[in-house]
Image (cartoon, helix red, strand yellow):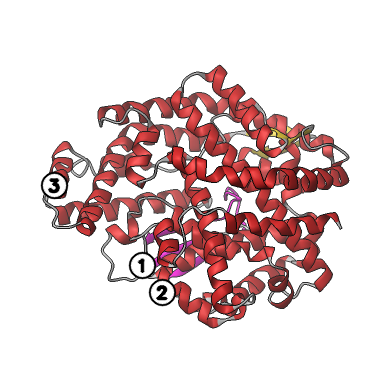
Amino acid sequence: MSYEEILKGLEEYHAELSAEDRLARTGLKAKPDFASIRAKRDELFTDEAIATVRELIERAPGSRRRDQMERVLFALLEGMMASATLPFEEQILAKAASLSATVDGREIGFHELAAAMASEDDAARREEIRRAQAALAEELAPLRLDREHAERQKLAAFGFGTLREYAETKKRVRYDIFLQKTLPILEETTGLYRRVMGDAIRRAYGKELGDISAAHVHHWRAGREFDHLFPPEKVMPLVAGAFATIGLPFEQSQAIRVDAENRPGKHPRAICYAPHAPEEIHLILKPQGGFDDVRSFLHEGGHALHFAHHDPALPYEWRGLPRSHALPETFAFLIGHLTQDPLWLEHVMHVPKAAAERLAAWSLLEDLFMLRRYLAKFSYELAFDEKPFDAARNRELYAKTLKDLTGFSYEPAFWLEDMDGGFYSADYLRGWIAAAQVEEHLVRKYGDRWFLKRDTGAFLKAHFARGAAIDAEELVQDLGMTAWDPLPLIRKFDGVSRLLR
């Protein structure tokens, strides 16, 4: 096959996988059939195709052309790995969709248990739901472990000793160096986090941080005290208006197809699919009303607008084959974190001033919790990768690492369930840091009300247009900043102390 035929085949393959996942996730298909999609591409994922691309890489005339071809090579390797892992992915998805728990006479599907804890006001019942969730996670663990085995066997056949080695090679990141760069975040925020989160948990649940189950995390993160500010019928218009205010009118993006229907079998978590950026984007939401809908719409809407403004002239390698997900997460965090700004809440979302101050501080605390949780997840995943099949060690390590950094007790049962494939946790963290840097740049450029300036939209569109050709670190360097500088992110969290007033 020629390079052009390989590239065209990859684009079609990824679009088909995206559609299959979307249909199953939204309840429009009973279960996905990834394996048959992969099987149709046997002529694409071959040693011969890999040899062709590797030879072209060796003869590439420059670094940019080499970068394009390396992305294709990694996509081919992942397609070959999929022959071993996709059957397990299908079994995991099908089994998860079939699992349910009966709590207080009510049957709750596995994917609905987190939402059930978020909406349950009775603390004992939340803990009962969490125990049921942990038991179901244990049922899925053997399949998840089989998938880990299959993936690592394929990686070894390609010459990679660990998943970390593969991810670092593809993403051009040294995780030990990156982890060291994140340590100041923990060092500078731990005292503040323990003080403010401890007070918040004590007031809400009468428990001490360090002595509270993760059963209450979803309930606390839902921000139920703010739900009255965002009734169901107003969430979509309000957030759409927020995008328009920033110079990114949602309704003008004909490529973005919004599915906000609350149908049976639809996964509750919002997600964005970009099978053909910038021509076809799918934004999937399951709105219930309340602050969580605002947060989800902003974050996933940020993804959708980024994809919808890719330059269509970009080659597929720079539209659909990112080296990592750190750049799209940067833009999604930048827009999603608008909820941390009391001025934005007051002037764009029409929240009364006093409530805006409290909600912004609470949103910052929620973000600090999530940041520390993902630092814990990343640290755990690095350790897991060293001994992935030492179940007793990893179960204990998971529970200890999550509790040490968040103060909430996480059950060992989630040692495989609570992991992000391909070190996506690190992509999130890279995006978190870069988003704070970009926000500081926008404040310097347009003032503290940058979210009211249409010039902000023009600035973002110019960077959206670059697609996946660069990564988060290159974006901030282009803005004259130092990659992985944690200080802008650390500075943001000073505002959580307002909750103690």
- Distance between the Cα atoms at labels 2 and 1? 7 Å
Q: Give the number of the disc on residue 462.
A: 2
Q: Residue at x 44, y 67 (%)?
A: 479
Q: Residue at x 14, y 41 (%)?
A: 51
Number of dots carrying numbers: 3
Q: Which residues are magenta?
A: 255-284
* Dots 2, 1 in contact, CB < 8 A: yes
Q: Quadrant of residue 112?
A: top right
Image location (x, y in percent) of residue 372: 63, 43
Image location (x, y in percent) of residue 65: 20, 58
Residue type marked 2 = Ala
* Dots 2, 3 in contact, CB < 8 A: no
Q: Which is nearer the eye, 149 or 480?
A: 480
Q: Give the number of the disc on residue 466.
A: 1
Position of residue 363 in the picture relative to residue 463 (left or right):
right
Q: Residue at x 81, y 73 (%)?
A: 353
First reached walking from the N terminus: tag 3 or tag 1? 3
Position of residue 334 in the picture relative to residue 279 (left or right):
right
Which residue bears the numbered disc 3? 58
